[in-house]
Amino acid sequence: MVKITKEIIVNNAQGLHARPAALFVQIASRYNSEVTIQKDNEKVNGKSIMGILTLGVQPGVKVILEIDGEDSDKVIAELEDLLTKDSIE
Amino acid sequence: MKISDFLCTKAVLADLKSTTKDDVIAELVDLLINAGSIEKKRRKDVLEILMAREALGSTAIGQGIAIPHGKYGSMKKLIGCLGISKQGINFDSLDGEPAYIFFLLIAPVDSAGPHLKALARISRLLKDKYIRETLKAAKDDKSILAIVQREDGRLSKL
């Protein structure tokens, strides 16, 4: 697999605050694929905590992940799992 | 949300003295105490909450920035302070770099929305490398505040 684009509704009860943003970046950074996350018309680097925080993603909001690289299938599985879990501290 | 909605203007410091994570968090909390934003008797509780949050994972978000934060029941509204370390402090950042710019936030318990908006605004302000370098080079507290207020105003117009 190479490029994957997927819409995901963020289900974390508190949205993408600092902790889930850090976890997101930790996952994304383990892989070679390029990762971006988009909310509305704003797209940021998925390997930057600051980038993700600028989006201020509230719970229940739709984001679009774009993952480009050899290992994109693994990345999307892990990130989707993270964003749809409702119990990140 | 604007930075001016939560930054305590009397709690801005251009030259943090601390050299460790624990000390700098205490120094930042003391800024808020001295500014009258937190009662002195709350110091121990607030420090415990902030350190417990750090134990979950560092609040250093890369690019030399840390945003230690916590929720505290006695707070009526979100409040923050800002301090700069000239020499940098090891804050267990994901990118392994020291932190120079510290934005500390203390929020009421049920304030996920405002907290998220404050984080977004701080990130928007500090994602600009020029702003980060200007803050690090600022010579006194007044200059720091002036830079933040100017950029906060500019972001509001975008």
Image (cartoon, coloured by chain):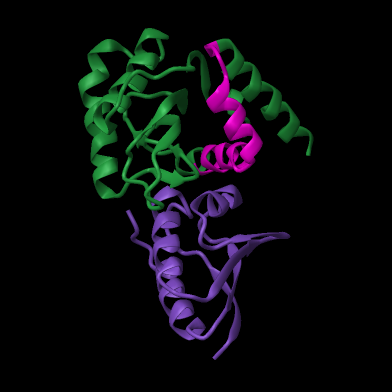
Chain colours: A purple, B green
Using the rendered image of the protein, determine whether residue A13 is visible from the camera's viewpoint: no
> For the image shown, how many numbered marks are present on the structure?
0
Q: Residue at 49%, 17% (x, y): give it.
A: B14
Q: Is residue A61 above or below residue A84?
A: above
Q: Residue at 59%, 32% (x, y): give it.
A: B133
Q: Where is residue B49? Give x, y as percent.
A: 26, 34
What kind of secondary structure does the magenta stretch mostly adopt? helix
Q: In this view, does A5 lie above or below A47?
A: below
Image quadrant assignment for residue B88: top left
Q: Which residue lies furthest to the front in this view?
A: B87
Q: In this image, B104 relative to A66: left or right?
A: left
Q: Does the magenta stretch include residue B42?
A: no
Which is nearer the eye, B24 or B9?
B24
Q: In this image, A38 relative to B86: left or right?
A: right
Q: Residue at 51%, 82% (x, y): give it.
A: A72
Q: Residue furthest right?
A: B157
Q: Where is residue A39? Give x, y as percent.
A: 64, 60
Q: Quadrant of the N terminus of chain A?
A: bottom right
Which is nearer the eye, B1 or B3?
B3
Q: Residue at 48%, 54% (x, y): give it.
A: A15
**What span is in magenta?**
B116-141
Which is nearer the eye, B55 or B49?
B55
Q: Where is residue A7? Give x, y as percent.
A: 60, 74
Image quadrant assignment for residue A69: bottom right
Using the rendered image of the protein, determine whether residue B114 is visible from the camera's viewpoint: yes
Q: In this view, does A31 lie above or below A58?
A: below
Q: In this image, B140 relative to A12: left or right?
A: right
Which is nearer the eye, B26 or B70?
B26
Q: Where is residue B56? Give x, y as percent.
A: 27, 49
